Amino acid sequence: MAEVIINAVDRNVVKKDLVLSDPNKKKEQMSGASQRIVIDTSTSLHITSSHYLSIAIDSGLIRKKFRGFDFSSKKLQDLATALSPINIRYGGTYADFLHFDPNGAESALPKHWDQEKQDLDQTFDSGFFDLPFDKEVANFTMTGRQWDNITRFCDKVGWDIMFDFNLFYWRNGYWDPANADLLLRYSAARGVKIPSFQLGNEPNAFFHNFNFSIDGDILVQDFMILKNLISKYPQYDASGLYGPDVTNLNRHESSRTYLQNFLRAGGCDAVTEISVHHYYANGRTATIKDFMDPTLLDSLLTNLDFLLNITMEVCKFHKPFRLTETSSCYGGGAPKLSDAYVAGFMWLDKLGLSAKYKVTHVFRQTFFGGSYALIDEQLNPTPDYFLSVLYKRLIEGPVFNVTTAEPNRLLRLYAHCARKGFYNYPDGALVLYYLNLANQAINFDFAQYGNDAVDVFLLTPGDAMGLMSRFVKLNGQPLVMKDSKVPDMPPKHETGDVTVAAESFGFIVIPSADIELCKRYHRS
């Protein structure tokens, strides 16, 4: 069992295992007092794969003819490659309006191409429309050439595709797979790899958005139609199927009810894994305080508790689940916040909590497009992009529980095995990553390892804008692209105490930890 001693310069509200304890105890905590943290490396809570952190691109980008997304750009290719290996989801609201035509003409740009996808909802507020939709404002065509550009790019940069099929094709009361069959036939003939599929997006919200509903039992039958279809293609019969993509179980009882009905109707067997969406707040109203609010961060726990309890109750076994669309704020993100340094608190905490809850994959919405994108419209990386690259380079394998004697609500800690590849760490290396939400620095004393060397990756705001900075520093040095090259991001080598800045996050690697479960994982 690995032990870490923390000397806290200041502690505010305390909690244990993310549950608040008596706030009056704050007065009893002395400045600089030692606090023992225990990382239980004798057992693993979960094992994350190299694809655990994944990304998404909204299908609306296809509708906008990939404006600003230049597949031939060396800079874009290098940015994308630095995240691989990774899954990429092409889906979202516009997935249910996508028509594939290998020889068709590209759809004209929508009248208001620069508006976010939530504006689509307003188009249908005035009335009810029968399926399939035929409204020019919504439906669009993806041509064979466009699909070729997507798939060739993904193959070049090491992205594995998860494609979301249009659910709004209907025949005799059920989903019509004809257009999906056309895309599969076209793809199979060209050797396109598609490891994962979905059908539809957020069906629990159809009535709110489009004034009609598709019941959970009907959706199960639709998934079975898709399952049968992909089984006919040798290239895709082993591909996974993920659904139903309900959203924010912690906020919407209708989402929980829909998921229960879907699973009770046979969804436990219809999909490879259950998929859900999660956002912390509304992008139009979110504030900078929201991004660092422990209560709001803990809302993900409520979401995952609902997910775990519903699946265990209905499926009677642990059915794997993934977050197939998630970010800080819905509605395209919060301008000047979701793309700033402060967004990293939500993103890193989501990765840590989800791993502890056995979430298999976390798909970041989005790689490109919207305020929550990892890269902006000029292909410049945001702080969350660099955070994501570091996570990919450092984290893989067993997940360990971290407990504290007197937990600090403003200090959140997670522990994993270190990934071997980029930094060539030993098989038994351990990574501790943290969020210091407090406005005081904290000193970490790794007493268990004496004066052994540690590698520090401390991420802080990149300029005078502070938490709202569009830039980030690693160990005091700004992270910038050199031409098209993503920086190497070397660690700072230290021994003994490690001081982490106030309102910061980062990673600390203990190369000499010699964790047996990590060694077994890497040698298996």
Image (cartoon, helix red, strand yellow):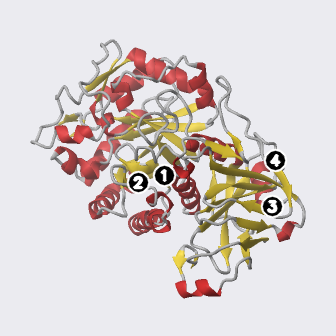
User: Quick one: 196 or 143, which is closer to the camera?
Assistant: 143
- Measure how far apart labels 4 and 1 are at the Cα level: 28 Å
Any part of residue 158 in sight? no
Q: Secondary structure at mark 2?
A: strand
Q: Quadrant of residue 412?
A: bottom right
In the image, taking residue 515 as reference, residue 330 lies left or right, namely left
Label 2 close to label 4 by CB (< 8 Å): no
Residue at point 71% right, 47% down?
394
Residues at discs 1 and 2 in contact (Cβ within 8 Å): no
* Numbered tag placed on residue 515 in the rendering: 3
Q: Which mark is residue 425?
A: 4
Point out the residue furthest to the left here: 127
Residue at image mark 1: 322
Q: Earlier in the sequence, mark 4 or mark 1?
A: 1
Pick out the residue farthest to the front. Answer: 464
Looking at the image, tell me whether mark 3 or mark 1 is earlier in sequence order: 1
Give me the C-alpha separation between circle 3 and circle 1: 27 Å
User: How far separated are the C-alphas under marks 2 and 4?
Assistant: 34 Å
Mark before the other along the chain sequence, 4 or 3: 4
Residue type at the position of mark 2 = Tyr
Q: Which quarter of the rendering shows the N terminus?
A: bottom right
Distance between the alpha carbons at the discs numbered 3 and 2: 34 Å
| Residue 192 or residue 491, whichever sits in front | 491
- Does residue 119 appear to the left or right of 18 in the view shown? left
* Residue hosting label 2: 279
Residue 475 percent across, percent down from the top left: 73, 48
Mark 3 surroundings within 10 Å by alpha-carbon count, few (fewer than 14), some (14 through 19), many (20 or more): some
Percent across and percent down for residue 225 are 32, 39
At x 60%, y 23%, the residue is 75
**Which of the two discs, 2 and 4, sits closer to the camera?**
2
Q: Amino acid at mark 3?
A: Ile
